Amino acid sequence: MSDCFSPPTSPQDTAAYLHALDPTVQYRDKHSLETCYEPLFFFRKHPAVEFHHPIDAPDSMFDRVILTEWAKPAMRGVLETISSHHSANLELTEFSLKDLKIFCNYQTPEFKPRFKLVCGTRNATCEGMRMNYIQAGQIFKEIVNASLGTPSSWDILIEDFQDLLQMLENPILEEAYLMRNHPALLALKLHSQFFMACYETLMRASLQSVFEVFKMLPYGMNDSSGHWKVRLEQHPYLWWMLHSQFTSYGDRNSEQCRYRRNYSCHKIHHLTKRTERFKWYSANDVDMLLYQYLPMSLPGLMRAMWDEGLLALFCLRLDELFTK
């Protein structure tokens, strides 16, 4: 143990000793309103994931552990740091959770912690750049572990975040854009805007490209995760949106996109006596329902459009969404 952390030898030293041990002040910058926290201390107090039961769900089939809203931009910031260094032909030296510092100002009205990697840089190599993404994925897993406290909760970790973790396990450098802009890291309130940006681009694409995109979407006829209509019919509100509106939907994946387009545009309805139970639903409740019942919908759409070369048509707009 170094001298600065030696046990106090007199009562007068006790306060200073305890102050030095406090992980919330060891890295405090007196010129900044932010305080730097050690990861394990921070995630025990502020978990980056939380358990969520869908509002009015009749069972636990779609209960999920999801990322908190503040964790999404913080994690994306790590991937942005990696990407920006790679763009400058640099890679980060080896890093792990102990090299992650968390900066937060509790005095602001919005809780917005920032993650910062404290490590060196060197000239980039293909293998080194891949390792940066692999190590980022390992950090994200450790963050989930520190937040959960129970390994069994991994079984219900939301599927889109699982998809991102799998991409980071075996990263393809040419797909760095897909990793740092993965929908799992997009704020829930922006899901509708994200989908509409994709949908509008699709409507301007060639019929052949649109057909290929629809063919690749998740929750199709032979998807082992279940058909999109069957999944939606498990919740009373999603069933009502599917069957009790002014339009009907077929089974094809193109209909899944049409449903989502109408769902995004008509979150708040004039409700009848039959549907009065839904009158307390907020826009956030409605977005969360669709997210938990079709969690791979946006990542699947983004991947399909990437494979068809359609993302380049609105990359700037997509980047703006992630920085809102």
Image: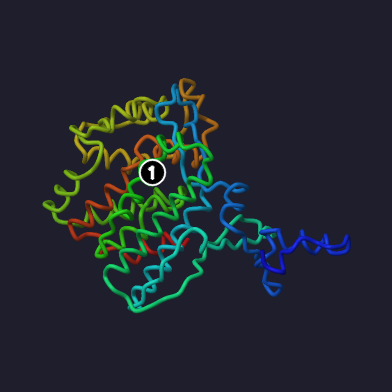
Of 153 and 229, which appears nearest the observer?
A: 153
Q: Position of residue 145 (x, y in %)?
A: 49, 45
Question: How did the renderer colour the structure?
Answer: rainbow
Decide if residue 58 is on the left or right side of residue 262: right
Of 253 and 130, which appears nearest the observer?
A: 130
Badge 1 amino acid: Ser
Of 203 and 239, which appears nearest the observer?
A: 239
Q: Quadrant of residue 13?
A: bottom right
Give the residue at x 47% y 61%.
Answer: 324
Q: Position of residue 316 (x, y in %)?
A: 34, 67
How many discs appear?
A: 1
Q: Position of residue 298 (x, y in %)?
A: 32, 47
Decide if residue 97 is on the left or right side of residue 110: left
Q: Quadrant of residue 157?
A: top left
Tell me if residue 289 comes above or below residue 121 in the rendering: above
Residue that numbered label 1 is attached to = 264
Give the residue at x 60% y 58%.
Answer: 38
User: What kind of element bears circle 1?
Assistant: helix
> Farthest right residue?
11
Give the residue at x 50% y 44%.
Answer: 49
Decide if residue 245 is on the left or right side of residue 29: left
- Image quadrant occupied by the N terminus: bottom right
Give the residue at x 45% y 34%.
Answer: 152
Q: Position of residue 9 (x, y in %)?
A: 83, 63
- Check disc 1: other Cα within 10 Å, few if <14, some if 14-19, many if 20+: some
